[in-house]
Amino acid sequence: GAGVSQSPRYKVAKRGQDVALRCDPISGHVSLFWYQQALGQGPEFLTYFQNEAQLDKSGLPSDRFFAERPEGSVSTLKIQRTQQEDSAVYLCASSFLTGRESPLHFGNGTRLTVT
Amino acid sequence: KNQVEQSPQSLIILEGKNCTLQCNYTVSPFSNLRWYKQDTGRGPVSLTIMTFSENTKSNGRYTATLDADTKQSSLHITASQLSDSASYICVVSVSGGYNKLIFGAGTRLAVHP
């Protein structure tokens, strides 16, 4: 596709429910990142994939958060037993290369609201 | 702790005026500094990226500066337009390994007619 696509665009979950957020990166992009953005704040790193390998998951806030990218393309961020503090925009970004100067392309995010 | 701080938190200017946004960082080791524009409800879009050896870079009406000695950067917007209303986020990349980015909280700019 032309850009990074995320779905759903909006998700409302009741506290305790499980949710799954999907990211379709730009075709051929090796690197994929997930970020969490609270209202009025900058994005905060959650996890990084290089192809199908999850090389860094140090930003995941708890063991309720799980991410996968089994075939090195589409990625899913799963949140189990959602809590109100999980309410945020979840951004996915991808880049063609793995280097530090590689441009990052962001999706428009999934806004998660936990009630 | 790696941190990126931006000021002001928010800014209102009139259409056609210039403005300058500030960014201070304590990220180490430093690789590069980026400015992103984020429209409401959208993902961030890259404006500029500067490495250690670059001290200025322009992208249309946007000009970013970098002083690696004082660990400061600025983003200057010339002849503002209504479409410049957005959040501007300063992002610093950590050297070593993959593309690990530290984001500032952003400056929310509103351009009024």
Image (spheres, coloured by chain):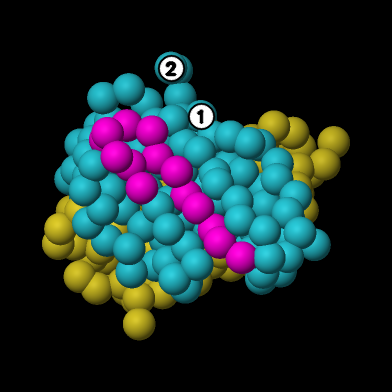
Q: Where does the image place residue B94, in percent across and percent down from the top left?
A: 25, 63
| Secondary structure type for disc 1 | strand
Which of the labelled discs sits on residue A1, or is there none? 2
Chain painted in cyan in the figure? A
Residue identified by numbered label 1: A5
Residue A56 vs residue B53, the one in the foreground: A56
* Residue occupying image coordinates x 45% and y 24%: A3
* Residue occupying image coordinates x 24% and y 73%: B28
| A77 in the magenta segment | yes
* Residue occupying image coordinates x 39% and y 67%: A59
* Residue occupying image coordinates x 47% and y 50%: A77
Q: Is residue A72 above or below residue B25?
A: above
Q: Please, what is the three-letter code of the amino acid marked with disc 1?
A: Ser
Q: Residues within 10 Å of mark 1 (few under 14, many from 20)?
A: many
Does the CB distance between marks 2 and 1 fall below 8 Å? Answer: yes
**Tag 2 and tag 1 share a subunit:** yes
Left or right for B14, reference B46: right
Segment colored magenta? A68-81
Q: CA distance from mark 2 to mark 1?
A: 8 Å
Q: How many marks?
A: 2
Q: Residues within 10 Å of mark 2 (few under 14, many from 20)?
A: few
Chain painted in yellow in the figure? B
| B86 in the magenta segment | no
Left or right for B44, reference B55: right
| Secondary structure type for disc 2 | loop
Q: Chain of mark 2?
A: A
Residue B18 vs residue B23, the one in the foreground: B23
Left or right for A87, reference A32: right
Q: Is residue B83 above or below residue A61?
A: above
Q: Chain of mark 1?
A: A
